[in-house]
Amino acid sequence: MEPVKGGGLASVPEEAERLMREVRPDDSPASWALRFAAGLDGFFMVLSGMNTMEQVKDNIGTFENLTPVTPEETTILEKAVEIIAEDTAVPCTACRYCVEECPQDIQIPVLLSIYNETKKYGFINFPTVHYQNAVFGHGKAGDCIECRKCEKSCPQHLNISEIMKELAEMFDWCLDIKY
């Protein structure tokens, strides 16, 4: 399940995509993920959620002429994994299972996205404004009561309650700003 990691492997850092396209210029990063999953021992089916007709066509094209990932390609995928890990502070796929469980109505994936962008780029692009908008009408990071219901439902097994503490320190102060 989740061969494309909730869409996270459909859009990878440029450096990772460049490595893949050097070997298979016509294949999308998502097709690499699907080919990898399809080649694992003991699996007979690969499920993939799609949001656009382009993704449907890409998936069909991948499986019409399915070729297993070669050892050389596996090496490229290992390098891509390293690049992706370095580029992402929190590997949230925005599946929203955590939001359904949150008794404080915290929009966790949105806050984690702001967290990732801030870790990557710093406090440019107005993350405080994005945070203010994200929590308007919803719980803020500091409202987390550490019930861990979100963590139990998270397919990525993220330590959300700890990240919420850090997010609260980073951003809850900005809610006191009046414009």
Image (tube, grey):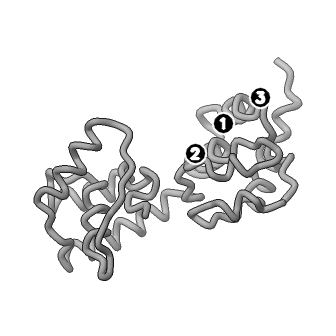
Amino acid type at mark 1: Pro
Amino acid type at mark 2: Glu
Q: Quadrant of the C terminus?
A: top right
Q: Quadrant of the N terminus?
A: bottom left
Residue 106 percent coordinates (x, y):
75, 43
Mark 1 nearby-residue class (10 Å; few <14, some 14–19, many ≥20) = some
Q: CA distance from mark 3 to mark 1?
A: 14 Å
Q: Earlier in the sequence, mark 3 or mark 2?
A: 2
Q: Would you name the residue on which mark 1 appears? A: 127
Query: Which is more toward the observer, 112 or 146?
Result: 146
Closest to the camera, between mark 3 and mark 2, is: 3
Q: Decide if residue 109 is on the left or right side of residue 8.
A: right
Residue 140 percent coordinates (x, y):
80, 41
User: What residue sits 71% from the left and 36% below the top?
Assistant: 131
Amino acid type at mark 3: Phe
Name above or below for residue 125 compared with residue 117. above
Q: Decide if residue 134 is on the left or right side of residue 21.
A: right
Tell me whether the residue at label 1 lies in contact with that at label 2, contact meaning CB atoms closer than 8 angstroms: yes
Q: CA distance from mark 1 to mark 2?
A: 8 Å
Q: Residue furthest top?
A: 179
Q: CA distance from mark 3 to mark 2?
A: 19 Å
Q: Earlier in the sequence, mark 1 or mark 2?
A: 2
Q: Decide if residue 100 is on the left or right side of residue 6.
A: right
Residue 117: give its label. 2
User: What residue sits 87% from the left and 55% below the top?
Assistant: 145
Residue 136: give its label. 3
